[in-house]
Amino acid sequence: MGNQLDRITHLNYSELPTGDPSGLEKDELRVGVAYFFSDEEEEVDDRTPSDCGFTKDHSPTEEEPYPVSEVEYSAFCSQECIFSKLRENEDLNVYSVKTLLTMCKPGDLLELVGTAQPPHWVIYEHDDQIIHLHKGEIRKDSLLEISNGRHGRIVNNRYRFRPLPPDLVMQNAVGHLSLRSEEICWTNSESFAAWCRFGKREFKAGGEAHSAEQQYFLKVHLSGSGVHTLVFRSLEDMIRERRRVDASGILKELSLVNGGKD
């Protein structure tokens, strides 16, 4: 994937150790609460399978994984790794939706990927049914119908937070069905699905208390141009920028830090 770099600077610090944050927050297990933020993301459009980067001539059989070219990331909050998408550490291949459905369990996090668009995240319920945030509404849909040519994978371990039990994940998702626009406090499908699975208020827009000490570091691993680090004040901001890069392939400068490339 081609990338243009606009004056990106890099923070010189060694790779930080991976650790599990403190886990779930009891006050985040509530469901059916009204919010006032709206969804800003238009996803799962009407592109054909070829528009999504998967054509009939190159589609795998249902049993075969499909490699895709993607930007790789790792992310840290203070000294804890909270997110990792690195091919050297995990299988980043994607599967046809029919194959994916044979692999899923209730409460799983699924990611649908396509070319030049942000990935779409959903919570798997059962059979072919998923719950997701789409165009300002939290809704239940058929995964086969909404995939529209995209391939997908299970991403339960993408975030390093401790997951909630599957029944609580489904309680979070089902309890917010039919909420619209001004009632929603997640700005994209990933933040909503991740909140359902982990129950962390940091995934909500405006749900994180800012402090001078707390910073998020997003390391963008680009083939041939090293590792570039961006600094953010909130998890929400970091997620939105990473998804923008996935869709556009372009990094923009968010914060000046000392150093150069790894």
Image (spheres, grey):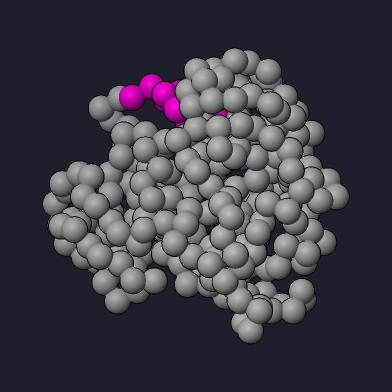
Q: Nearer the viewer, residue 117 or 22?
A: 117
Q: Residue at x 30, y 39 (%)?
A: 232
For the N terminus, which image quadrant? bottom left
- Does residue 152 sit above or below 181 in this rendering? below
Give the side of residue 137 with respect to residue 236, left or right.
Answer: right
Query: In the figure, is residue 5 to the left or right of 62?
Result: left
Secondary structure predominantly adopted by residues drawn in magenta? loop
| Residue 147 locus on image (x, y percent) | 66, 56
Residue 59 image position (x, y, % from top left): 66, 78
Q: Which residue, as the protein is rendered here, is positioned at the far top?
A: 34
The magenta stretch spans residue 204: yes
Looking at the picture, how far across and down is residue 129, in whole percent? 79, 45
Q: Tell me if residue 235 can be seen.
A: yes
Residue at x 50%, y 32% (from the top left corner): 39
- Which span is picked out in magenta? 200-210
Q: Is residue 22 visible?
A: no
Q: Residue furthest right?
A: 127
Question: Based on the displayed image, in which of its 4 quarters is residue 246 positioned?
Answer: bottom left
Question: Which residue is at 55% across, 32% downward?
Answer: 136
Q: Is residue 129 left or right of 204 when viewed as pictured?
A: right
